[in-house]
Image (cartoon, rainbow, N blue to C red):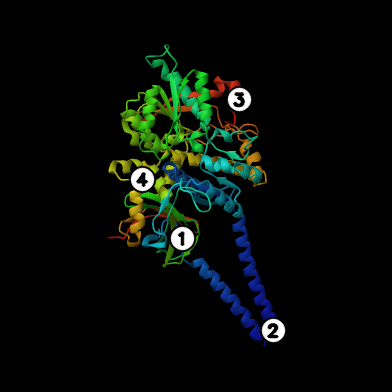
C-alpha cells in the first residue's frame, strides 16, 4: 500500500509539473499577444486603391513583429474585407471588440465616420485611411487618428499651389478671376468630405465657382459631366474620386477639349493614374501624403523588402503609394502602443493620451511629414507637398505652408471640417 | 517490494530523460534548411447556389430595405498544403486573389493558424462569397477601362458567370497567392497560383 502510494504520488507530481509547465507556456504566449483589427476594402467601390493598402497593412504588421513587436509583445492582426459596406464594417467592429482588440486600422470615410461615435464611447483608437478633415478635432472625434494631412488641408494646398504656380502663367491672368469646379460622387462620404473646405479656399483666393458635377466612383463614361465643365469654361477642376474614375474623367476631359487643369484628391493620385490616363494625366496636380512606392526615402527599403517577401506573387510595378500609406498608419500605431505600454497601460485611453498625443514631430520616414498630435489638434502637419505629373512621373511643385500663410485661420477656423 | 519501487522510479526517470533527449536531438528548423511548403489548388466548389438575379435600389421590396441586391455566389477553394520538412510547420496567413477569366473580382484568405505535421499534406478550405452588386462595383473600379475597351457590359458578364458557374464553363483563376509559414522562428512564404478547371 505504502509503495503504491509513493508511486501514485510520484506520477501525480510528474503530471502536475507537466501540466503547470504547459499552462505557464500557454499563459505567457497569450500574455505576449496584442490583438489589432483591420477593416479593408478589397472588393468594393474603392478596391482599386484598397487592395494595395490592405496588403501594406499586413506587411507592415509583419515588419513590426519581426522587429520586436510592442516591447516584445507580438501583434495578432485580424484583417477583414468589408467591401466598403458600412453595415458590414459595424458588424466586424463588434467582432474586434469580442476578440479583445486594443485598436483598429480602419479604411474609408463611410465606415470611419459611422463608427466615430462608437469608438469614442468605447475609447478605441481607430487609425484609418480616411483622412477626412471631420476627424481632426479631438473635441468631437478624439479616437480617430491618421498619419497624414487631411483631405481638406490637402485640397486647400492643391488649389493654392495651382493658384501660385499655374494661374500666373495663364493668358487671362490679371484680366479675370480663375474659374473652378468640382467633380466627384456626391453620395460618397470620402469624395464629398473636403468640398466645403476647398470651396472656402477657392473663395479666399478669389475664384469663380461653378456647379459641381456628380461622377460615380465606378464611372467609365463621364462625357456629359465634362461637357458641363467645358460650357462653364473651367480653368481648374478638382477631382474627388479614386484612381479609376478620375482616370476616366481626365481622359474624357482631354478628348472633349475641356481645356482645364486638374487637381486630384490623394486617393485618385497614384502610380496608376499616368498609366490609365496616359497623355491626359500630364500636368495633373495633387497632394501626396508620403513618398510613392519605391522612392528613395528613409524606410522605403523595408516597405519594398516586405512587399517582396510576403507577397512574392505580386510584381513590384503593381504596388502603389497605398502600401506606403498603410505603413504610415501602422508605424504611428506601433509608436503609440510602445509609449503607452512603457507607461504601464495598453488600453485605448492610454494609447491615445500616453501614446499618440505625446508625439511631437515624430519622424516615421517614408517621405511623410513629421507627425504631431496634441490633445486639442489631431491635424498632423500644416505643410503639404503638392506634386504634378510630368512625363508620366510625379515631381514636386511646391510645399504649401498653410499654417504659416494663414496662421489664424489654421489655428481657429479650419480644424474639424 | 522496496526493490520494485526503486526500479519503477528509476525506469520512469529514464523514460523522462529519453523523452527530453529525443526532443533535444530532433530535427530543428533553421532558415537555410527550411523548405517552403507547397500549395496546390485541389478544386473549386460551388458551395451554395441561388442562380442569378438582380434588382436595383428603386424596386419596392416586400420587407426590409430597398437596395442594389443580387444573387450571392458562394465558392469554396480547396488547397493541398504539403510540408516537406522533417518537423511540423504552422500556416499563419493565407491569401489570394480570385479572377473570373481575366477580371479580378475578390481577395480572400484565412488567418487561422494550422499546423502541418512533418512530411504530411493538409487540406485547407477557403470560402469566398461574391454577390452581383459587389462584383459589379469591383469590375467597375478595377477593370472599368478594360471592359470599355472590350465593349463588354458588366452585367452581361456577371450574368454569364453566375449562370454557367455550375459547369465551370469559364476559367476561375487563383492569383497572387501568398502563404506564410513559421516553424520555431523560421519564416517561409509560398507564392501560388492556379487555374480551375486546369484544362
**Letter of the chain that mark 1 sits on in the rendering:** B
Which residue does the image show at 34% across and 54% down from the upper left?
B161
| Residue A413, numbered label | 3
A6 is higher (above) or lower (below) than A61: below
Distance CA(mark 2)–CA(mark 4): 70 Å
- Which residue position holds label 2? A3
Whichever of labels 2 and 4 marks the residue nearer the N terminus, that label is 2
Of badges 2 and 3, nearer the viewer stands 3
Disc 1 secondary structure class? loop
B47 vs A329: above or below: below
Q: Determine whether the residue tagged by mark 4 lies in a helix, strand or loop.
A: loop
Give the residue pinned by disc 1: B29
Give percent across and percent down for residue B193.
Answer: 35, 55
- Work out how far the residue at label 4 is from the one at label 1, CA to CA, in angstroms: 29 Å
Chain letter of disc 3 in the image: A
Q: CA distance from mark 3 to mark 1?
A: 60 Å
Q: Are marks 4 and 1 in contact (CB under 8 Å)?
A: no
The answer for how far apart the CA atoms under marks 1 and 2 are is 44 Å
**Both marks 2 and 3 on one chain:** yes
- Whether residue B122 is visible, yes or no, is yes
The answer to the question of whether label 2 and label 3 lie on touching residues, with beta carbons closer than 8 A, is no
Q: Determine crowd level at label 2: few under 14, some 14-19, many 20+ residues with C-alpha closer than 10 A.
A: few
User: Label 4 belongs to which residue?
Assistant: A315
Q: Nearer the viewer, mark 4 or mark 1?
A: 4
Q: Position of residue A40 (x, y in %)?
A: 49, 46
Question: Which corner quadrant of the image does residue B172 belong to?
Answer: bottom left
In depth, the one of A368 and A376 nearer the eye is A376
Mark 4, chain letter? A
Image side of residue B48 versus residue B167, left or right: right
Query: Circle 1: is it few (<14), some (14-19), or many (20+) Cα within 10 Å?
Result: many
Amino acid at each position: 500500500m505504502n509503495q503504491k502510494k509513493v508511486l501514485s504520488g510520484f506520477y501525480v507530481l510528474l503530471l502536475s509539473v507537466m501540466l503547470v509547465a504547459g499552462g505557464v507556456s500557454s499563459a505567457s504566449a497569450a500574455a505576449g499577444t496584442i490583438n489589432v483589427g483591420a477593416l479593408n476594402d478589397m472588393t468594393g467601390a474603392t478596391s482599386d486603391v484598397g487592395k494595395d493598402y490592405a496588403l501594406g497593412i499586413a506587411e507592415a504588421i509583419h515588419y513590426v513583429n519581426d522587429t520586436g513587436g510592442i516591447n516584445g509583445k507580438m501583434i495578432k492582426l485580424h484583417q477583414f474585407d468589408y467591401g466598403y459596406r458600412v453595415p458590414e464594417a459595424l458588424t466586424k467592429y463588434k467582432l474586434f471588440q469580442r476578440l479583445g482588440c486594443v485598436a483598429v486600422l480602419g479604411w474609408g470615410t463611410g465606415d470611419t465616420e459611422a463608427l466615430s461615435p462608437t469608438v469614442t464611447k468605447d475609447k478605441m483608437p481607430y487609425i484609418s485611411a480616411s483622412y477626412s478633415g471631420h476627424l481632426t478635432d479631438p473635441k468631437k472625434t478624439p479616437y480617430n487618428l491618421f498619419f497624414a494631412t487631411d483631405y481638406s488641408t490637402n485640397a486647400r494646398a492643391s488649389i493654392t499651389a495651382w493658384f501660385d504656380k499655374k494661374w500666373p502663367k495663364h493668358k487671362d491672368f490679371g484680366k479675370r478671376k480663375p474659374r473652378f469646379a468640382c467633380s466627384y460622387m456626391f453620395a460618397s462620404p470620402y469624395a464629398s468630405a473636403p468640398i466645403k473646405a476647398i470651396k472656402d479656399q477657392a473663395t479666399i483666393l478669389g475664384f469663380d465657382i461653378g456647379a459641381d458635377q456628380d461622377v460615380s466612383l465606378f464611372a467609365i463614361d463621364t462625357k456629359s459631366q465634362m461637357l458641363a465643365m467645358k460650357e462653364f469654361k473651367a480653368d481648374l477642376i478638382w477631382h474627388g474620386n479614386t484612381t479609376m474614375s478620375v482616370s476616366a474623367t481626365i481622359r474624357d476631359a482631354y478628348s472633349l477639349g475641356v481645356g482645364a487643369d486638374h487637381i486630384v484628391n490623394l486617393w485618385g493620385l497614384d502610380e496608376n493614374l499616368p498609366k490609365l490616363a496616359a497623355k491626359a494625366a500630364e500636368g495633373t496636380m495633387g497632394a501626396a501624403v508620403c513618398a510613392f512606392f519605391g522612392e528613395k526615402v528613409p524606410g522605403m527599403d523595408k516597405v519594398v523588402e516586405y512587399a517582396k517577401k510576403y507577397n512574392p506573387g505580386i510584381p513590384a510595378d503593381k504596388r502603389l503609394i497605398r502600401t506606403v500609406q498603410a505603413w504610415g498608419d501602422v508605424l504611428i500605431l506601433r509608436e503609440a502602443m510602445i509609449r503607452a505600454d512603457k507607461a504601464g497601460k495598453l488600453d485605448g485611453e492610454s494609447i491615445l493620451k500616453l501614446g499618440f498625443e505625446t508625439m511631437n514631430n515624430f519622424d516615421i520616414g517614408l517621405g511623410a511629414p513629421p507627425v504631431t498630435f496634441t490633445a486639442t489638434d489631431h491635424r498632423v502637419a500644416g505643410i503639404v507637398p503638392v506634386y504634378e505629373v510630368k512625363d508620366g512621373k510625379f515631381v514636386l511643385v511646391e510645399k504649401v505652408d498653410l499654417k504659416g500663410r494663414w496662421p489664424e485661420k489654421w489655428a481657429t477656423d479650419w480644424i474639424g471640417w | 517490494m522496496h526493490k520494485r519501487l526503486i526500479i519503477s522510479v528509476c525506469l520512469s526517470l529514464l523514460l523522462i530523460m529519453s523523452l527530453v533527449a529525443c526532443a533535444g536531438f530532433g530535427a530543428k528548423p533553421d532558415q537555410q534548411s527550411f523548405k517552403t511548403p507547397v500549395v496546390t489548388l485541389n478544386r473549386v466548389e460551388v458551395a451554395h447556389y441561388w442562380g442569378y438575379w438582380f434588382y436595383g435600389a428603386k424596386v419596392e421590396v416586400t420587407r426590409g430595405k430597398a437596395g442594389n441586391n443580387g444573387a450571392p455566389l458562394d465558392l469554396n477553394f480547396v488547397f493541398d498544403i504539403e510540408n516537406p520538412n522533417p518537423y511540423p510547420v504552422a500556416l499563419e496567413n493565407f491569401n489570394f486573389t480570385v479572377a473570373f477569366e481575366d477580371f479580378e473580382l475578390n481577395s480572400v484568405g484565412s488567418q487561422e493558424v494550422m499546423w502541418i505535421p512533418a512530411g504530411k499534406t493538409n487540406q485547407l478550405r477557403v470560402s469566398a462569397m461574391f454577390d452581383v452588386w459587389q462584383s459589379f462595383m469591383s469590375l467597375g473600379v478595377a477593370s472599368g477601362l478594360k471592359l470599355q475597351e472590350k465593349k463588354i457590359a458588366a452585367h452581361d458578364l456577371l450574368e454569364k458567370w453566375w449562370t454557367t458557374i455550375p459547369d465551370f464553363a469559364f476559367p476561375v483563376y487563383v492569383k497572387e497567392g501568398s502563404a506564410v509559414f513559421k516553424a520555431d522562428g523560421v519564416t517561409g512564404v509560398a507564392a501560388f497560383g492556379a487555374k480551375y478547371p486546369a484544362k
